[in-house]
Amino acid sequence: MAASRFLFVHGAWHGAWSFDLVRLELERRAVPCEAIDLPCLGDDRTALSEATFESGVLRILDRFGTRRNWTLVGHSFGGFAATEAALRASGRVRSIVYIAGWVPRAGDDWKSVAAMAPATDGFRVCSRKNADETAIELDARAATPFLWHDVAPGIAAAAASRIRPQPTEPFESAKIGGTDALLAKIPRSLLLATADRVLPPDGLRAVATRAGVPVEELPTGHCPFLSAPKRVADALLGVR
């Protein structure tokens, strides 16, 4: 069987740049990997009005092209778009790995799953909707002790400088289609960040258990690809 090709899907406010360090780790091992900007995030300049959950899913599918054996790696909220894309991908996805995020079942919408495992109170007060409620703006300075508390200061500062407003529509419309039977055909796992200050680990573990998805622990905060890229690469490749 051909080797898996990794495609990284970032979480809210972030971009493909989030995975630069872990991609370097994988590339050193001759492992093919790519990362994608979801609409209106990272370096993407899609208009905010066009930055929908559906457009994000379609962007992932477009990146697949005709290639197969993809492992989708979804961070935090990015796991929703990754899951929906995998279900539509006609067998091109080998597996899904969630990093510090919710693991949905078929039929789940983001709001209901997030209610089972809500963000911490401290992190929630770091964000607010813009004037017309089309985006959620994050105070990167206030959010740093939650998102990047275990990340080297220079790397954390660089990440904070690249954060962009998160379109609201994907949160509102994110929903997983298909059936649990179809989803069960795609091997899935969760890399749980045990020192996460954004999404409490116990809540994420409970959601993963509900979905019947195994959990592997990483002793990191919410963004292990920035704080411990080698550990993440090892986990993705099954290195013990």
Image (cartoon, rainbow, N blue to C red):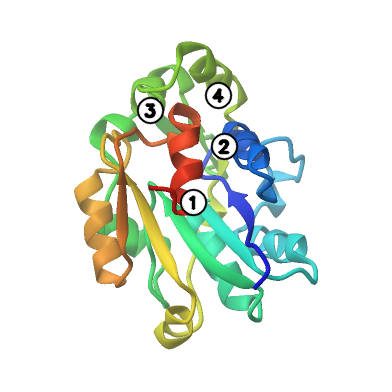
* Image position, residue 143 (x, y; %): 40, 24
238 is higher (above) or lower (below) than 199: below
- The answer to whether residue 41 is seen in the rendering is no
Gap between marks 2 and 1, in whole Å? 10 Å
Q: Which residue is under mark 1?
A: 236
Characterize the local packing of mark 4: few (<14), some (14-19) or many (20 or more) Cα atoms within 10 angstroms.
Answer: many
Amino acid carrying label 1: it is Leu
Say which amino acid is labelled 3. Answer: Cys
SS state under label 3: loop
Q: Earlier in the sequence, mark 3 or mark 4?
A: 3
Left or right: residue 166 compared with residue 228: right
The residue labelled by disc 4 is 159
Name the residue rendered at 63%, 79% in the picture: 91
Mark 1 or mark 4, earlier in chain: 4
Q: Work out how far the residue at label 1 is from the one at label 4, CA to CA, in angstroms.
A: 22 Å
List the residue tagged with mark 2: 22
What's the distance in space between the residues labelled 4 and 2, CA to CA?
Answer: 14 Å
Query: Of label 3 and label 1, which has the lower sequence position?
Result: 3
Image quarter of residue 61: bottom right
Q: In the image, is residue 179 above or below residue 7?
A: below
Residue situated in front as seen by the camera: 16 or 55: 16
Q: Which residue is mark 3?
A: 126
Residue at 74%, 45% (x, y): give it.
Answer: 47
What is the distance, in whole Å, between disc 3 and disc 1 at their CAs?
31 Å
Whole-Å distance between the Cαs marked 3 and 4? 16 Å
Name the residue furthest right. Answer: 66
Element assignment for label 1 = helix
